């Protein structure tokens, strides 16, 4: 047999090519459409293989795509001197030998991530949405447990108006209902995804020292507002949610069942479309004063209705019940959010490099989820003490240093420059007035 049975490329009419009747390889309409899209993007790169009589040996899918595209002629190569058995065997071998190849998963992930950074349509590579989501969802390793939260400082370094830059992320110490603070945080950008956990107004009351669960004492701010103040507060932060998101941006808003109607009303009036109520089911109940202890939290899911939603959930087999364990390493409060919960929302509703906004930064769990999953985060936090917690948590997790925007110095340098030494008088005052928080997230004051 000659070494090059098909060494000439020529053009043949598509209508003259005869598919092999017993071709065991199938081509769905979806796959033919993928091949057609590939031809539109790159042109015809590989000739099909035929025998002397125009019978197809290799390239049945490409011929179907050519017909779909309405092409009259395509490039072919003619295999000469093959027996009937050799032709039939090669129809199988051409497909099976390709299937026997593998992938270097690490290099594949790097290549796909780089292509995504170029804003290239990854669907043209032939990978499904589910496959791409899985390949691009690999977490970056941190130096600490993702759910570990530093202690709340007695005297904060941050002051209102500070913007801390942490790699691709930004944190503003400010009020999520004040437009100037929101503008400072966003710096002209709008988010692809909102994930946030506003105040609940459920009157938990202060967690007292020596409680059976071992949670640290915290005062709770704005935890029992009257109806008028609460409605004003909800309208304010929902208006900010709208201002910081792109048309069609997805939104996940965690809220108590008690105040669900008020927040649902606020979001709808702020031009968000409700799509689903997701139920986070915890692995253990939370003790309360109610007759029935709660073991779930609801998440309001929808999008900015100025446009069609930016991204559909890639895995169509998911339900609105999310069974995720509570954090085991947090002693802040029984309803602190696990990073894994936020990561699921990020992976379902954003691409790598997407801009994620959380206007109630709290302890910084959204930031850690974004750091792990390659998203850019924008956080607002009213309480300077919790702004410090967020910065310190990110620095501990990444081993990197946050810098103060407009100054350039790092967090430690700013602390030294602002003279954050604890005197006996300030220590006594701080210990008598514990940090204000709710569920590990400080309450924002109403505008």
Image (tube, rainbow, N blue to C red):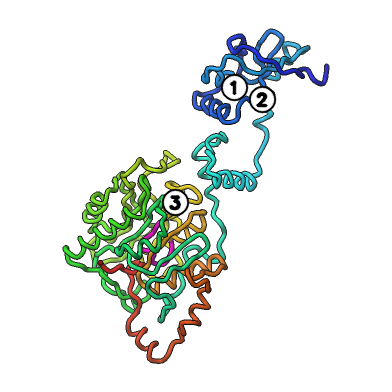
Q: Does the magenta stretch include residue 248?
A: no
Marks 2 and 1: in contact by CB < 8 Å? yes
Q: How crowded is mark 2: few (under 14 residues within 10 Å), some or many (20 or more)?
A: few
Task: Please name the predominant secondary structure of the magenta segment in the image.
Answer: loop
Q: Position of residue 44 (x, y in %)?
A: 62, 25
Q: Does the magenta stretch include residue 358?
A: yes
Q: In the displayed structure, would residue 281 be above or below residue 315?
A: below
Q: Which residue lies furthest to the bottom in this view?
A: 424
Spatial CA span between label 2 and label 3:
39 Å
Dot 2 or dot 3, earlier in sequence: 2
Q: Position of residue 210 (x, y in %)?
A: 35, 79
Q: Where is residue 104 in the image (x, y as percent from the top left)?
A: 66, 44
Spatial CA span between label 1 and label 3:
36 Å
Q: Mark 1 points at which residue?
A: 62
Q: Mark 3 points at which residue?
A: 346
Spatial CA span between label 1 and label 2:
9 Å
Q: Quadrant of the N terminus?
A: top right
Dot 1 or dot 3, earlier in sequence: 1
Magenta-drawn segment:
357-365
């Amino acid at each position: 047999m000659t070494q090059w049975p098909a060494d000439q490329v020529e053009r043949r009419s598509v209508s003259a090519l005869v598919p092999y009747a017993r071709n065991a390889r199938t081509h769905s309409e979806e796959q033919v459409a993928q091949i057609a899209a590939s031809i539109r993007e790159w042109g015809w790169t590989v000739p099909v293989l035929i025998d002397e009589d125009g019978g197809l040996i290799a390239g049945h899918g490409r011929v179907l795509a050519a017909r779909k595209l309405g092409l009259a002629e395509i490039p072919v190569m003619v295999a000469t001197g093959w027996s009937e058995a050799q032709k039939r065997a090669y129809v199988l071998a051409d497909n099976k030998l390709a299937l026997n190849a593998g992938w270097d998963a690490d290099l594949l992930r790097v290549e796909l991530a780089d292509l995504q950074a170029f804003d290239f349509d990854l669907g043209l590579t032939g990978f499904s949405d589910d496959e791409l989501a899985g390949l691009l969802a690999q977490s970056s390793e941190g130096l600490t447990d993702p759910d570990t939260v530093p202690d709340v400082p007695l005297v904060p370094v941050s002051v209102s108006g500070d913007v801390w830059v942490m790699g691709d992320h930004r944190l503003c110490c400010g009020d999520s209902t004040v437009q100037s603070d929101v503008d400072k945080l966003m710096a002209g950008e709008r988010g692809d995804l909102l994930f946030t956990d506003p105040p609940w107004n459920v009157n938990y009351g202060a967690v007292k020292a020596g409680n059976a669960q071992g949670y640290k004492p915290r005062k709770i701010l704005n935890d029992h507002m009257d109806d008028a103040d609460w409605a004003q507060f909800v309208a304010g932060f929902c208006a900010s949610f709208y201002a910081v998101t792109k048309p069609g941006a997805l939104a996940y808003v965690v809220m108590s069942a008690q105040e669900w109607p008020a927040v649902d009303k606020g979001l709808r009036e702020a031009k968000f479309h409700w799509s689903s109520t997701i139920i986070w089911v915890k692995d253990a109940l939370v003790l309360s004063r109610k007759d029935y202890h709660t073991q779930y939290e609801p998440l309001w899911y929808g999008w900015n209705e100025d446009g069609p939603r930016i991204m559909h959930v890639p895995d169509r087999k998911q339900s609105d019940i999310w069974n995720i364990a509570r954090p085991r390493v947090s002693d802040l409060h029984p309803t602190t959010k696990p990073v894994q919960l936020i990561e699921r929302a990020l992976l379902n509703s954003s691409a790598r490099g997407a801009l994620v906004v959380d206007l109630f930064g709290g302890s910084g769990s959204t930031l850690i989820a974004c750091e792990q999953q390659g998203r850019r985060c924008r956080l607002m936090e009213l309480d300077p003490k919790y702004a410090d917690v967020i910065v310190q948590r990110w620095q501990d997790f990444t081993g990197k240093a946050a810098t103060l925007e407009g100054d350039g110095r790092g967090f430690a340098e700013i602390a030294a420059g602002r003279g954050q030494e604890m005197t006996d008088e300030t220590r006594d005052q701080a210990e008598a007035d514990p940090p204000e928080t709710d569920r590990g997230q400080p309450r924002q004051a109403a505008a």
